[in-house]
Image: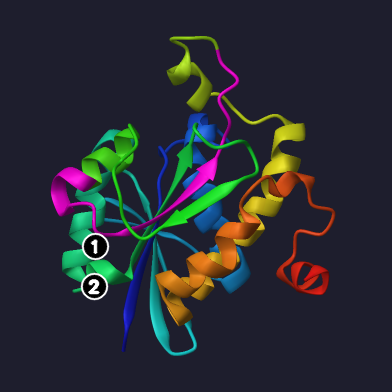
Amino acid sequence: MDKYLIVGLGNPGSEYALTRHNTGFMVVDAFARKAGVDFQDKRYGFVAETSVKGRKVFLLKPTTYMNLSGNAVRYWLNKENIDLSRLLVISDEVALPLGSFRLKANGSNGGHNGLGHIQQLIGQQYARLRMGIGNDFPRGMQVDWVLGKYTEEELEVLQPAINHAVNIITSFVLAGIDITMNQFNKLGKGVQNKPDNTPEGKEKEE
């Protein structure tokens, strides 16, 4: 059976819930809810298992804290013998506006500590989905911004992007990175301004 590892980056613990840095956790939580599966506390992370049309999908929320995320990713790739081409990492991104997202097949860590540690351990040839959290903070205050909690209004702006991200995971597993990028990246630019953010609505527009 084909196996996939979907990693949402964040920090464990209730004090970090709904913080901008935990957007990756929020995406895999949403996917797990839709799939009807629960996370179990396992080595290096909370892990849930599901399948998409016969393909095994492991959902991982590392418990290593953000700066050591690579330890969890490398361990679960090796444990389940999953190829790098079947790894998708979801992270927050200050360089993108809140409510937008960008899917890439590979690339640099962009200054993100979690992606940076993963890159140190396994290289940069893996797919990543960057979820925009905006950068409305004074110079030198980035740490406070990413560790700050979303407001109710911000969560409303973020939710359509999370919905898209859940669909991106499914598409990544079934169709691969290239087709998924072509289909979804055009939806990721300023999605908060779209009246209908569902894939069905988008198809009607086109």
Seen at 28% across and 70% down, the residue is: 85
Residue 129, placed above or below residue 21: below
Residue beneath disc 2: 82
Whether residues under marks 2 and 1 lie with C-beta atoms below 8 angstroms apart, the answer is yes
Q: Secondary structure at mark 1?
A: helix
Q: Specify whether 111 is left or right of 25.
A: left
In the rendered structure, does residue 124 fall within the stretch colored magenta? yes
Q: Which residues are magenta?
A: 119-137
Residue 165 visible in rendering: no
Residue 179, placed above or below residue 20: below
Residue 101, placed above or below residue 206: above
| Neighbours of disc 1 within 10 Å: few (<14), some (14-19), many (20+) | many
- The spot of residue 124 in percent (x, y) is 23, 52
Spatial separation of the CA atoms under disc 2 and disc 1: 8 Å
User: What's the mark number on residue 76?
Assistant: 1
**Nearest the eye: 105 or 206:** 206
Q: Specify whether 77 is left or right of 87.
A: left
First reached walking from the N terminus: tag 2 or tag 1 = 1
- The spot of residue 42 in percent (x, y) is 30, 57
